Image (tube, rainbow, N blue to C red):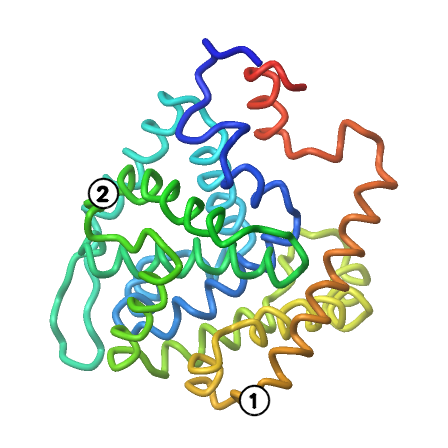
């Protein structure tokens, strides 16, 4: 390995690289959006400032690019991407629909909620899909991700850094969470996203809207929602039964097997995400 290479925030020996090498973490990203929507102020901020309704796939691409940069970019690339996000958040305001209060999008409480919901969802989804991690590795993942929290503007000392701290944080947050009109609309949108008009001909868009691809996506979205903690499922009006957890585990393991099989059938150059491949090349591990 080239130890002089700029490996950014993490590197090939990190648990973060191990977790995010798994394609199934994309399902974790969807899970995190369902979870984030349960925070009334966070979902109001998204609805009032985001283009996700008019350009959902573009927003997804931009978010994925940011996460990829933080994971695999050089120190300079991470700082450039993060400073842009900090500037955008600092300039934005939203109104709490319950109280009428105006608030900033870079409030630490909001940034912390989004960060924890994301990293916990990535990690939990990967583990429940079958990625083997020790308890020590789980805690290392959360501790490593403090670096991602810091670059977005959080004081690392205020962010949960172990599995136990994340569990305590969720327990403390639950009285503040719940379903609002924004939450319900966002969850429905995540479950039934539109097919962009520029995606080919009308017959193709109709096929994606009503055909097998749509039903496959329903399965993925249903799995992401079923992977939520039982208390979160109950807030959405679902069931908190252990049997739901077991069926979600079976489903996400099946999706992981399908994704890995699909990747194995592809040419080698397509099996690794471009940002990860460049980072491996910098580390001398291509």
As drawn, the residue found furthest toward the right would be 265
Q: Is residue 150 left or right of residue 192?
A: left
Does 270 appear above or below 242?
above
Does 180 appear above or below 281?
below
**Going 51% across and 44% down the picture, which residue do you hit?**
64
Which sits earlier in the primary sequence, circle 2 or circle 1? 2
**Residue tagged 2:** 153
Quarter-of-image position of residue 197: bottom right
Q: In which quadrant will I find the N terminus?
A: top right
Q: Where is residue 77 in the image (x, y as percent from the top left)?
A: 40, 24
Q: Which of 189 and 276 is in front in this view?
A: 276
Residue 159: numbered disc: none
Q: What is the spatial separation of the Cα atoms under label 2 and label 1, in whole angstroms?
A: 37 Å
Q: Is residue 162 left or right of residue 247?
A: left
**Going 38% across and 29% down the picture, which residue do you hit?**
78
SS for callout 2: loop
**Residue tagged 1:** 241
Q: Where is residue 166 in the image (x, y as percent from the top left)?
A: 35, 62
Q: Which of 222 and 121 is in front in this view?
A: 121
Does 76 appear above or below 10?
above
Q: Decide: few, some or many residues near mark 2? Use Cα within 10 Å; few <14, some 14-19, many ≥20.
A: some
Q: In this view, does 264 lie to the left or right of 235?
A: right
């Amino acid at each position: 390995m080239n130890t002089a290479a700029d490996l950014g925030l993490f590197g090939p020996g990190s648990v973060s690289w191990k977790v995010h090498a798994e394609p199934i973490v994309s399902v974790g990203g969807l899970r995190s959006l369902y979870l984030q929507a349960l925070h009334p102020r966070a979902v109001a901020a998204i609805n009032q400032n985001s283009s996700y309704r008019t350009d959902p796939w573009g927003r997804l691409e931009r978010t994925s690019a940011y996460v990829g940069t933080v994971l695999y970019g050089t120190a300079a690339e991470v700082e450039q991407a993060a400073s842009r996000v900090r500037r955008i958040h600092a300039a934005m305001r939203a109104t709490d629909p319950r109280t009428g209060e105006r608030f900033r999008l870079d409030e630490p409480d909001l940034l912390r909620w989004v960060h924890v919901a994301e990293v916990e969802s990535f990690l939990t989804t990967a583990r429940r899909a079958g990625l083997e991690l020790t308890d020590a590795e789980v805690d290392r993942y959360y501790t490593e991700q403090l670096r991602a929290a810091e670059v977005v503007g959080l004081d690392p000392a205020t962010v949960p850094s172990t599995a136990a701290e994340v569990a305590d944080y969720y327990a403390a947050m639950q009285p503040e969470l719940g379903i609002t009109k924004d939450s319900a609309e966002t969850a429905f949108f995540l479950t039934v996203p539109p097919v962009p008009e520029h995606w080919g001909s009308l017959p193709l868009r109709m096929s994606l809207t009503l055909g097998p691809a749509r039903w496959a996506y329903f399965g993925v979205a249903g799995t992401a929602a079923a992977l939520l903690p039982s208390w979160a499922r109950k807030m959405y009006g679902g069931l908190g039964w252990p049997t739901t957890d077991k069926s979600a585990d079976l489903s996400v393991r099946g999706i992981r097997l399908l994704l890995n099989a699909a990747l194995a059938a592809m040419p080698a150059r397509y099996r690794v995400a471009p940002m990860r491949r460049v980072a491996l090349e910098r580390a001398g591990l291509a």
